[in-house]
Every structure is written in C-alpha cells, then in structure tokens.
Image (tube, grey):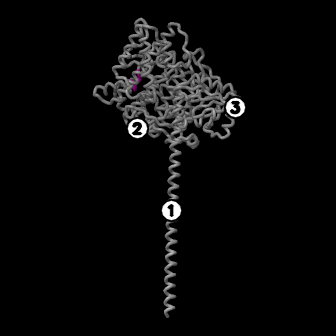
C-alpha cells in the first residue's frame, strides 16, 4: 500500500510537472507571439516613416526643382546643347506626358542637366524638319521672360531633334478645366500632388501670368499664334498671393509652345503677318484669322479671351463655347436687367466664381472675343481687369468682396477705342509686368476700366477711415508699377526721337536704364532715381509682390521719388514730358 501511495504521488507530481511545462510553453508562445506582433508593428511603423520621409523628400525635391524652374524663368540660363546619343538613350525609359502637332513630350532625367531631376523633352514628330526645332530654340531664347516656359537645352540632330524645358508638374490649365480621364492620368504621370480642378482665383491667376507673357511677346513684336489653355502650364507649387480679401494660395503659370511664334515684319505691331502654317486650335482661333489667314496681337488676345470664358464656365471651345454664351455676354455688357443667368450659373457651378467678378470679367471677354475687330480691347487693358478682379474679386468660396469693389466707383459702359497699334508703348515694355488699363491711342492717353476705378475708389475709402493696410499696399504696388512702366515708355520714346540705336533684345531693365537715362556727371540724378524705382518695381513683381523685411518704402518716399523723376523728365524734355498726367492716369507718374 505504501508503495502504491508513493507511486500515485509521483504520478501526481509528474502530471503537475507536465502541466507546468505546458503552461510554460503557452507563456513562451504568447510571449513570442507578442514579440512578433511588436516586431511587425515596429516594421510597419518604420515602413510608414520611410514612406513618409520618401514622400517628404520627393515633395521637397519637387519644390526645389519648381523653385529652380521659376528662377530659370527670372534669370534664363544658357541652354545646353545635347548629343543625339544622350537624348535617344534617355528616351528609352521616358514617360510620355503630352502630345501635340509639333512633337511628343516626355518626362525624363538627362545627365547633361544635373540637379534638375525630371525635365520635359519635346521630341519632334517624324517628318518635322530639325530646322523647325532650331527655330523654336531661337524663339524661346528671344522670348525669355518670367512668365514664359524657360528653355534648358536642345538637340539639333535630325534623328533626335528636341527641345528641353522645365517639367511643369501641375499640368496644363486645360487639364484642370476639363478633368477628363486622360487629363487625370497625365497629372498623375507628372507627379501633381494638389487638388485637380482649381479654385476661381487659381484659374484667374494662371490667366494673369499668361497675359503678362503675351504682353511681353507683343512688346518685342512677337506673336504667339496658338494661345490656348493647353499652352498655359502650372508649376504645381502653391504660393501665397496677398489680396484685399486675405491670402490665397495659387500656382505659378507659364506660357508654353512658342514654336509657332513669329516676329512681326519690321518689328511693327500695326501690321498683321501671314500664317506660314495652317495649324490652329479649334475653338481658340479668331474668326478674323480664319477669314484672312493673318495673325495679329488681336488674334492672340482672342485666344486668351476664349481661355477666360472657358475658365469661367468650364465649357469646351471645340463644342461651341463662344456661341453658347454669346447672348448672355452681349446682354450683360448691354446692361439688360436679369441678363446672363445661364453664364452666371455656369460660373458658380464651375468654380464658385463671385458674381461681381464674373460680371466684370465678362466685359473683358466681350472686348477680347465678341467685339468687332477695330474695337477690340487692348491686351494690357484686359490684363489690368484680370488683376483687379483677382485682387478684389472675393474669396475662394464665392464671397462678395467684388461687390464692394464694384460699388466703390460708378461703372462706365464706354471705353477708348483701338486705333492703330494694339497697345501703347508706355504700357508694354519688355518686362512684361502688370500694367494698368492702357489705351492703344496714338497719344498714349488712357481711361481706366471699371475695376481699375473701383480700386481707386476703394483705396480712398479705406484710407479715409484708416482701414485695411494690405489694400493700401496693393495700391502702392500698382502705383509703383504704373509709374515705372510710364517712365520706361517715356525714356524709350525719347531715345527713339534722338535717333538712338535700338537696344539689344534681351537687355535687362538695369541695362535699359543705363542706356536710356543720362548718367554723366551732373545728370546722374535721373539715372539714380530711375534705378530706385526699378528696384521697387522688381520687389512688387517678385513672387507676387513679396518684399523683404524693412524694404518696403513709405507712401511719402514713393511720392517723392516719382515726383523727382517727373520733374527731371520734364526738365530733360524741355518741360513737355507726356508723363505728367492727372492722378489715376495709367500713363501718369503720379
């Protein structure tokens, strides 16, 4: 019995040991499972961090490259001549991001352009003469401007003929307005990370950039000849834009595809040029061009007007956009009660356009598109209307800030007619910057458009009540810009009257002043004051009016410099300076 009890006790102990070992294995299994779960969680966290870091690095690199592209537009680099082998080798792994009548656009990295990352290589289609590629290279070099797509390189070899520009990751304005499946796929290939579609202010900002580029081309007697939304490219980086309604975020836009651009015969903007190609874009081509086969500054401006109508309504030019809204536009301009309901509704649906801004921009559409040829709105005057609507047009939710702007001054239905040139010399310098509403009349006189008068009225109202300082700053920037453009126009006319040699194309503003203003001992005050105004003007233009801390002059300083320049110009011209007009005049230095 004792042995049996001992055996039973041993069996119980063995059973307990087995149970303990089982529990130990369970604990170890649970511990291993927890450790595996923790390891997997850590791995997922590290992978997420790696991906986030990669996305952040890619975004930083993209922003760096876009900033580099903007700098290249401001300060054009010498284009790199590429070898055929390098181009052909790179294109083997390239991604197609666009196609047109001239060539196919690929996104690719090139060893000869280190630091640029992916660039846009537009390779000529089969059958396109390499000489046409070199002609486009020549045009791009002559058309260099902060709002024209910068040229980085080219290849003139027939089997690899191409031009290379900065890659615009934001795609084209056309992509965002139509948002077709092809457009969405193209934006994805380009690496666009924003929200497709664009707010009304982003649409209008892009059109302002394109209009400035066109003014620059026309001031150098060059026509674009294919202005359309597909040729307005966005860089894809949101930048601050300070307006009367607060800060907005917009994209920089660049006018592209100057391959069809052509210099006017004799440099005259009063004569049309015959088309050497039957290439044109359906819906964007001016009926006057289709009838006469002649391009002019007005046919370029027509394409911009159709682009504005497309941005307002979201319609497609190739599907009767012009005729669809013709009655609404004509009735709204005529001031008929309750007119434009269909167009206003389309604008609200397309991008929540503020009604007052829409009504003002419709007048620009009418002047650029529907008006008879002899009465067409001069492009600098249209640009002034664009910029005034952008600054005072309301918020991005369709707010009614523009209503206050429209009420600040009476709106006149008449405007100066175009006679002779398409725009005045004083308003269209090679800087291509914003100008006020300039008339194309031969004497250089002007009558500001309704929104320009509204800006002046708002400024007086705000100053009287000690109101919004940001509005006063915007008006100060306009005053500086107008004064500078007027001064340069006067200096250029004075230079021509004295029989001076034409300035080299591509001259910087500093070089122009040094050549045009007297800089000899005893006469350097005008040159020095002109350079002061130039520096302020550049600060107004730089990244949409950003100033470094402490650099912004006071209104008193601005007035003193402008008055000094006007007096010096009067004295230099024998007391008959044309720039001493009344306050508010687009050609007045005051």
The residue closer to the viewer here, 292 or 275, is: 275
Residue at x 41%, y 15% (from the top left corner): 529
Instruction: Please tell me the numbered disc located at residue 398.
Output: 2
Mark 3 is surrounded, within 10 Å at the Cα level, by few (under 14), some (14 to 19) or many (20 or more) other residues, namely some
Residue 376 visible in the displayed image: no
Residue 93 falls left or right of residue 222 = right
Q: In terms of secondary structure, where does tag 1 sit?
A: helix
Q: In terms of secondary structure, where does tag 3 sit?
A: helix
On the image, numbered disc 3 is attached to which residue?
Answer: 84
Residues at circles 2 and 1 in contact by the CB criterion of under 8 Å = no
Mark 1 is surrounded, within 10 Å at the Cα level, by few (under 14), some (14 to 19) or many (20 or more) other residues, namely few
Q: CA distance from mark 1 to mark 3?
A: 57 Å
The residue closer to the viewer here, 97 or 513, is: 513
Q: CA distance from mark 3 to mark 2?
A: 51 Å
Residue range highlighted in magenta: 448-452
The residue closer to the viewer here, 83 or 390, is: 83
Residue 155 falls left or right of residue 288 = right
Question: For the C terminus, which image quadrant?
Answer: top left
Indicate whether 456 appears above or below 517.
below
For marks 3 and 2, the one nearer the N-term is: 3
């Amino acid at each position: 019995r004792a042995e049996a009890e001992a055996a039973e006790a041993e069996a119980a102990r063995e059973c307990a040991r087995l149970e303990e070992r089982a529990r130990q294995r369970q604990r170890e299994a649970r511990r291993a499972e927890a450790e595996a779960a923790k390891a997997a969680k850590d791995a997922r966290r590290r992978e997420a961090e790696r991906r986030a870091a990669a996305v952040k690095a890619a975004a930083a690199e993209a922003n760096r490259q876009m900033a580099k592209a903007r700098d290249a537009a401001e300060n054009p680099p010498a284009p790199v001549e590429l070898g055929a082998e390098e181009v052909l080798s790179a294109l083997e792994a390239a991604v197609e991001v666009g196609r047109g009548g001239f060539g196919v656009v690929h996104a690719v990295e090139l060893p000869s352009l280190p630091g640029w990352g992916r660039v846009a290589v537009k390779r000529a289609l089969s059958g396109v003469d390499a000489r046409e590629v070199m002609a486009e290279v020549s045009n791009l070099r002559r058309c260099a401007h902060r709002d024209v797509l910068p040229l980085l390189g080219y290849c003139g070899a027939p089997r690899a003929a191409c031009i290379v520009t900065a890659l615009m990751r934001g795609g084209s304005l056309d992509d965002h307005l139509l948002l077709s499946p092809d457009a969405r796929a193209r934006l994805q290939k380009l690496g666009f990370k924003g929200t497709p579609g664009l707010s009304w202010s982003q649409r209008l900002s892009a059109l302002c950039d394109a209009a400035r580029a066109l003014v620059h081309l026309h001031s150098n007697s060059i026509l674009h000849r294919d202005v359309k939304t597909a040729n307005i490219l966005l860089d894809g980086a949101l930048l601050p834009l300070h307006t009367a309604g607060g800060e907005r975020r917009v994209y920089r836009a660049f006018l592209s595809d100057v391959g069809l651009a052509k210099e006017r015969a004799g440099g005259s903007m009063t004569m049309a040029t015959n088309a050497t190609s039957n290439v044109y874009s359906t819906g964007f081509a001016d009926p006057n061009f289709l009838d006469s086969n002649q391009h002019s500054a007005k046919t370029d401006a027509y394409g911009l007007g159709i682009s504005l109508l497309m941005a307002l309504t979201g319609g497609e030019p190739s599907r009767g956009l012009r005729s669809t809204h013709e009655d609404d536009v004509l009735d709204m301009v005529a001031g008929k009660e309750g007119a434009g309901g269909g167009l206003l509704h389309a604008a609200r649906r397309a991008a929540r356009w503020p009604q007052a801004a829409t009504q003002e921009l419709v007048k620009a559409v009418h002047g650029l598109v529907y008006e008879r040829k002899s009465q067409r709105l001069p492009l600098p005057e249209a640009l002034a209307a664009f910029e005034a609507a952008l600054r005072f047009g309301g918020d991005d939710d369709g707010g009614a800030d523009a209503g206050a702007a429209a009420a600040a001054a009476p709106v006149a239905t008449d405007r100066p007619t175009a006679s002779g040139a398409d725009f005045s010399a004083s308003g269209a310098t090679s800087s291509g910057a914003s100008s006020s509403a300039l008339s194309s009349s031969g004497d250089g006189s002007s009558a500001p458009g309704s929104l320009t008068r509204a800006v002046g009225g708002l400024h007086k109202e705000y100053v009287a009540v000690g109101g919004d300082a940001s509005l006063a700053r915007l008006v100060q920037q306009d005053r500086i810009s107008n004064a500078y453009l007027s001064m340069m126009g006067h200096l250029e006319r004075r230079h021509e009257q004295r029989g001076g040699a034409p300035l080299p194309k591509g001259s910087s503003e500093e070089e122009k002043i040094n050549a045009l203003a007297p800089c000899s001992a005893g006469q350097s005050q005008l040159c020095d004051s002109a350079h002061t105004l130039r520096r302020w003007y550049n600060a107004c233009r730089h990244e949409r009016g950003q100033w470094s801390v402490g650099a912004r002059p006071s209104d008193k300083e601005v007035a003193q410099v402008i008055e000094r320049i006007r007096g010096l110009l009067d004295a230099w011209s024998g007391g008959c300076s044309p720039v001493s007009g009344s306050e508010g005049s687009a050609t007045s230095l005051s």
